[in-house]
Image (cartoon, helix red, strand yellow):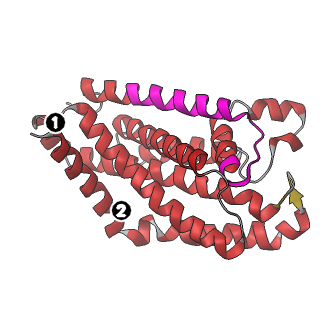
Amino acid sequence: MNTRIAFQTIVRKEIGRFMRIWPQTILPAAITTALYFLIFGQLMGERIGDMAGQRYIDFIVPGIVLMSVINNAYSNVVASFYSTKFQRHIEELLVAPVPPWVILAGYVFGGVARGLVVGCVVMAIALLFSEVSIQDYGVTLAVFLLTSTLFALAGFINAVFANSFDDISIIPNFVLTPLVYLGGVFYTVDMLPDFWRILSLGNPILYMVNAFRFGFLGISDIPLWQAFAISGGFTVLLALFALYLLQRGVGIKS
């Protein structure tokens, strides 16, 4: 089987799946984002004032956009691949002459695609409340690709080890959500006491949010090279680990 055809087939299936059920995959992100900007931006933003020399609502736009990308890239892959396991469609992929990297790339690309669609929707909503614009398109695109790929891979790994639908919600609820909210989306780490600021530096999402904010506003609490080094390093490690799991059939072959 031609690897290009196999890859395109998986990608079409993944994109078709989340677009077909857009009220469940895209609409909730739009509603949640509107509430974020209404509450934190419009109602509380005026009381908070400027943050890092920016209007508060402008300051939080990059973080909220990236937060939506992270959640949707992750949830798309974890739900889709686990459903493939649960419905035993995975057997069709295993018996087909398709290299493991093609399977992994197809699912990850589907997660990145959903992250892109939701990110664009969230950005469109942000423009209704803010006048923020992208200052560096290269940095913004690079951070988006690294971040969405990283969390799509994380979702794939979660799905590999999951044994029930409850298992695919544990990591997003108890690990991913706290890391995102404590990743500098709504504040700058410079305002934290020394202990909490140092502790925050152990959160990888902090680096991604700040690099994304640099692409929009030209400001960052973290050196840009550190953000790319950490994001790129985690992406490579998770890609190698996911490929290893797929090749060994962990959680897939009975």
Residue at the spot 48% in from the left edge and 38% down from the top edge: 150
Residue at the spot 43% in from the left edge and 48% down from the top edge: 166
Provide the residue designation for mark 1.
98
Q: Is residue 223 magenta?
A: yes
The quarter of the rendered structure image containing the C terminus is top left
Of 49 and 29, nearer the camera is: 49
Marks 1 and 2 in Cβ contact (< 8 Å): no
Region rendered in magenta: 214-241
Is residue 247 depicted above or below 72 in this figure?
Answer: above
In this view of the protein, can residue 165 be seen by the observer?
A: no
Is residue 175 depicted above or below 140 in this figure?
Answer: above
Q: Is residue 50 magenta?
A: no
Q: Quadrant of residue 61?
A: bottom right
* 127 lies left or right of 151: right
Of 95 and 209, nearer the camera is: 209
Q: Quadrant of residue 135?
A: bottom right
Across and down, in percent, residue 108 comes to: 37, 44
**Mark number, residue 18:** 2
The quarter of the rendered structure image containing the N terminus is top left
